[in-house]
Image (spheres, grey):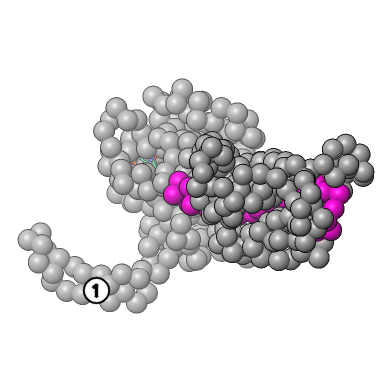
Amino acid sequence: MKIGIVIVAAGRGERAGAPHEGPKQYRRIGGEPVIRHTLRAFLTWEKAGPVVVVIHPDDESLFASAVHGLAKADRIIITHGGATRQQSVFEGLRTLSTTDATHVMIHDAARPFIDHPLLERIEALLGAGHVAVLPALAVTDTLKRAGENGIVQETVPRAGLYAAQTPQSFALTAIRSAHEKAAAARRSDFTDDAAIAEWAGLAVTLAEGAADNIKLTIRRDIAMADEKLSRQNALPDVRTGNGYDVHQLVSGDGVTLCGVFIPHDQSLSGHSDADVALHALTDALLATCGAGDIGDHFPPSDPQWKGAASRIFLAHAAEIVRQRGGVITNADISLIAEAPKIAPHRETMCQNLSEILGISRDRCSVKATTNEKIGFIGRREGIAAIATATVVYGVLA
Ligand code: CTP
Ligand code: MG
């Protein structure tokens, strides 16, 4: 079994918008022409044989630019369509008959959401010997028949009713001769290929269709498809900010780090409680939304911040981030201090961060290192901290 593909793309898309917007299969959804999505699905399916695309003679250059750079596009065989879908399919079948294909999947270019699982379901049925396979979904809406006057005449029982999709798939010679017969009988009113197969007496087997495999028909369908793909393609707007702070050690009775007072024979000197760790993290948070630094928001010259608990600064920065639509996803602090020992206090420090920022404990991290007795930190003249904040701000279009 060798499955050839016929993609019909010669329509004018009259229901989908103004003529100057061009045929719907070349309009862009998710940044790419509709037909490029459709073709990619088939070209990347490893069981696909020759791929015939039936285009309108006026669309040569539109088609060329729609597939420019598409992987495996050199496998595509182009042919020209006719005035009706039925004629376009017939042209495609004739062209496919010049290849070694034994079977054919006939698909609308205007159904870009075709997926491999559906192709596999159809292929399995063809492989089992079914001569005609129709992907379809059971109708779920209640159906009404109404007159021209808009008055309902009856409710149509929906049991046993299915909505047809494509790719409708066949043994190639069987569907080709069915089309030939239809043409010879001057029947041009068939709306799909399964109808021609039924008319020619072929048994048409149902395969389970896919809800996403819609045909873009009206303008609204194209807008909705574009929204759907744009959402999928959107990159999360993840931003990181870093912060650094250092304070001098002077003689005293203890230091405050990450909001924890640790008794020690030195103190950190500074205007507030000199909590270098929280100051560094405050700067890191502000840096994720271009909101300046801690000095802009809490000037050291302002007496109201004298001796202030630095958790106020951090909570304020978190509030600014949230007001700008940010969600804080991680806060990481490294302390560089020769003494006192940080390890016994790390858990309390992390819990403080979790509480001040209003995020879970596993999104908070405090680490510490000595400076190997070198430099000003090694000589116990000061303590430094560096911090990294990660904040997600919605999505990048
Ligand atoms: N098609 C085709 N040749 C035609 C008519 C239709 O190849 N003469 C293709 C369309 O390009 C489309 C598929 O058949 O991929 C399904 O047809 P439809 O949704 O009706 O598309 P259009 O005919 O282009 O749209 P409209 O009927 O609104 O003009
Ligand atoms: Mg049409």
Is residue 40 visible in the rendered image? The answer is no
Residue labelled with disc 1: 156
Relative to 365, is 391 on the left or the right?
A: left
Q: Position of residue 93 (x, y in %)?
A: 50, 42
Q: Is residue 199 above or below residue 292?
A: below
* Residue shown at the point (70%, 45%) measured from the top left: 269
Q: Which residue reaches farthest right?
A: 373
Q: Nearer the viewer, residue 202 or 49?
A: 49
Secondary structure of the residue carrying numbered label 1: strand
Q: Position of residue 39 (x, y in %)?
A: 54, 40
Q: Is residue 309 above or below residue 25?
A: below
Relative to 348, is 297 on the left or the right?
A: left
Q: Which residue reaches farthest top?
A: 61
Quadrant of residue 81 within the rendered picture: top left
Q: Amino acid at mark 1?
A: Val
Is residue 159 visible in the rendered image? The answer is yes
Q: Nearer the viewer, residue 22 or 166?
A: 22
Q: Is residue 275 above or below residue 127?
A: above
Residue 37 sits inside the magenta stretch: no
Q: Residues within 10 Å of mark 1 (few under 14, many from 20)?
A: few
Q: Nearer the viewer, residue 177 or 152?
A: 152
Residues in magenta, as a range? 319-342
* Residue shown at the point (34%, 30%) measured from the top left: 22
Q: Nearer the viewer, residue 45 or 344?
A: 344
Q: Position of residue 108 (x, y in %)?
A: 44, 46
Quadrant of residue 283 within the rendered picture: top right
* Residue shown at the point (31%, 69%) measured from the top left: 141
